[in-house]
Image: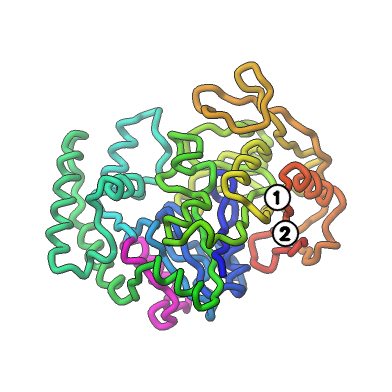
Amino acid sequence: MTVDVLLGLQWGDEGKGKIVDVLAPKYDLIARFQGGPNAGHTLEFDGKKFVLNTIPSGIFEDNTMNLIGNGVVIDPIILKKEIDKLKLAGVDLLAKKNLLIARKAHLILPTHQLLDASSEKKMGDSKIGSTLKGIGPTYMDKTGRNGLRVGDIHLPDFKNKYNKLVDKHKAILSNYGDIEDFSEREAAFFDALELLKQFEFVDSEHTVNQYLKNGKSVLAEGAQGTMLDIDFGSYPFVTSSNTTTAGACTGLGIAPNKIGEVIGIFKAYCTRVGSGPFPTELENETGEELRKIGHEFGATTGRPRRCGWIDLPALKYAIMLNGVTQLVMTKADVLSGFDKIYACTHYNYNGEVIDYMPYDICSIKPEPVWKEIAGWHEDLTGIRQPNQVPEKLQNYIDYLEAELEVPIKYLSVGPDRVQTLVMC
């Protein structure tokens, strides 16, 4: 058995949560492998809408186990709020016993958030566009080898470890100026830890590999998107973890030869939240129209997303990095009504026309080379079969498959789980 991986191919917000929810019945285990509560995975079904930040998107499937992997950073306060909201909606995770938490996952402390906010403030106009959830500073402590992990909660000297790390943070914060009072949040932090203790903590590397040994199916769920990867994204305007397939290996403890299908998700157009380069961004009425029709606002932060046409050099780059074997195109319904749509096929970059992602797109801005494509006007939200796809949309799909050299297996035509078509 192998682990299938599902991840985003753009700058995040591609619709990963919805597709995981659709695929969950096929898998015995859904495992988040990186990122933190900056993720906002939106699921809609039976007239209800849920936004998950840390909990894997297979949580609503009764026969599927869910794992928060070691590569994830966890804010106990936010996780408790997620758990409480689900319970109010009739999904009691303690009763269902279908959520596992990796002991090696790192904890986001209240002072991590203060560090995040202070750092962004100091950077001024050069700020990264952080969600201010404390994720970057937590990963910094992880790589600095002095972070706190979920498994530490049960150690008799946990409070001493906590105070030692907080003292370090206070020393750093003093250089930024006054330290904001965080006593209320600290109390909430320790209260949330008591709830976490009621869940089963596991060594994710053993758990996932035992599932495989027992012939069980596993899906690794990514957060954010490939173009936000700490190594291969639009650095420095990236997230703090590896959002690519390689991140599933380190974020769960699986060997590279255990990777099976790699399912890459992209929008029929493109969006980005926060600062940083965005070659195909439309800073005009068309961009505003895409934002309005697509309800392009961050599920976690509510921030308006920047919108633009699809970027093929960036997509080809993401497909190469991840070893994508099948594609999912989401939000095709948003493009209904446009007479013409466009695809960026190449970049004019530093006086040269190229079809690949260059080293630096921050200080040297790529200018898109556009291909005009006929749009469609049919309402897609009610279609349920591939043979109902309008001809011009099918032409767009065929064009993308030829350019990307990977089949588009699923097509999303609306936010509900039933609005997902199996194409091939």
Amino acid type indicated by mark 1: Val
Q: Is residue 16 magenta?
A: no
Residue 176 falls left or right of residue 253: left
Rendering coords of residue 169 (x, y %): 19, 45
Rendering coords of residue 385 (x, y %): 80, 66
Residue 386 falls left or right of residue 277: right
- Which mark, by number, is residue 334? 1
Rendering coords of residue 3 (x, y %): 54, 64
Rendering coords of residue 221 (x, y %): 52, 60
Tags 1 and 2 touching, CB below 8 Å? no
Residue 16 falls left or right of residue 55: right
Q: Residue at horizontal 28%, vertical 67%?
A: 192
Q: Is residue 99 magenta?
A: yes
Q: Residues within 10 Å of mark 1 (few under 14, many from 20)?
A: many
- Which mark, by number, is residue 409? 2
Q: Residue at horizontal 79%, vertical 34%?
A: 372
Amino acid type indicated by mark 2: Lys
Q: Quadrant of residue 345?
A: top right
